[in-house]
Image: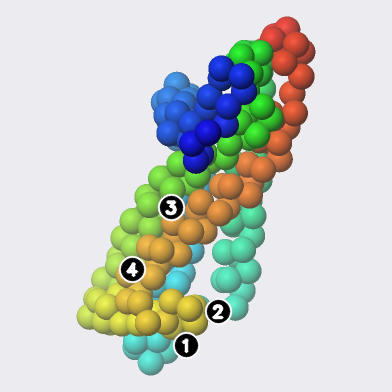
Amino acid sequence: MSKGTWEIGEVSFPLSEAIKISIENIKKRFTRALITALSVTLGIAFMVTLLLMAAIQEQQGKEGAAAYLYWLLFISLMVCGVGITNSMLIAVAERYKEIGTYKTLGALDRHILQLFLLESIVIGGLGGLTGYIGGLIAALAYAAINDAVNAAFIALSSPFSGLAYLGAIPTAFSLFILALTVAMALSLIATLYPAYYAARLNPVEALRYEV
């Protein structure tokens, strides 16, 4: 049995095939995936904007972002996570028969779990990327309005002081790493319950279910 492959009799489920199926599912349900990705985008864009604005203000010798803004960021990410969970639960309901078919063909609970978690990572990654770009644009717009363009570019190229373990990396790249990490982690955590619920479905009941 090769690494990343589970075999059930004559049935095999390579990781590459799981990724392919996950991407195809995203394409088939593009509108729902887009809405989910947009919720991630908004949360990450707010985070990147806030952190970059704080870095710009520090370059100008001002105080960084107020503490209550970080609480707002935390709440916005929590709301984003709830939205992802809700969206994935609806996706599970829409795919009962598909899940039942996979199980009757020999898929185990962990295979179904893997499919949904891979989808969430892809959606989270896309949301993190677009959120980073959106946050960067918003922060640069803020800098332009406040005549702080030079401070913005200095902040982007300077070591990031926002988090100790990213301190040696330029702010622009640090925020990119942070945006993708938070987006994918948030999507993954928010999808755990829907994915577990899907994995535990009875195949007979799933095949009889009418949406």
Q: Position of residue 35 (x, y in %)?
A: 49, 36
Label 3: how many residues lie within 10 Å, few (<14), some (14-19) or many (20+)?
many
Closer to the camera in the image, 58 or 6: 6
For marks 4 and 1 on the same chain, the one whose residue lies earlier in the sequence: 1
Q: Are marks 2 and 1 in contact (CB under 8 Å)?
A: yes
Residue type, mark 2 in image: Ala
> Helix, strand, or loop for circle 1?
loop
Residue lying furthest front in this view?
1
Residue 171 figure quarter: bottom left
Real-space Cα separation, disc 4 to disc 3, in angstroms: 13 Å
The residue indicated by pointer 1 is 63
Q: Report the residue marked by disc 3.
A: 128
Determine the residue positioned at 62% across, 29% down.
112
Q: On the rendered image, what quadrant is the C terminus found in? A: top right
> Could you tell me the amino acid type at mark 1?
Glu
Which residue matches tag 4? 173
The mark closer to the camera, 4 or 2, is 4
Determine crowd level at label 4: few under 14, some 14-19, many 20+ residues with C-alpha closer than 10 A: some
Q: Residue furthest left?
A: 150
Q: Which of the 4 image quarters holds residue 140?
A: bottom left
> Mark 2 packing: few (<14 Cα in 10 Å), some, or many (20+)?
few
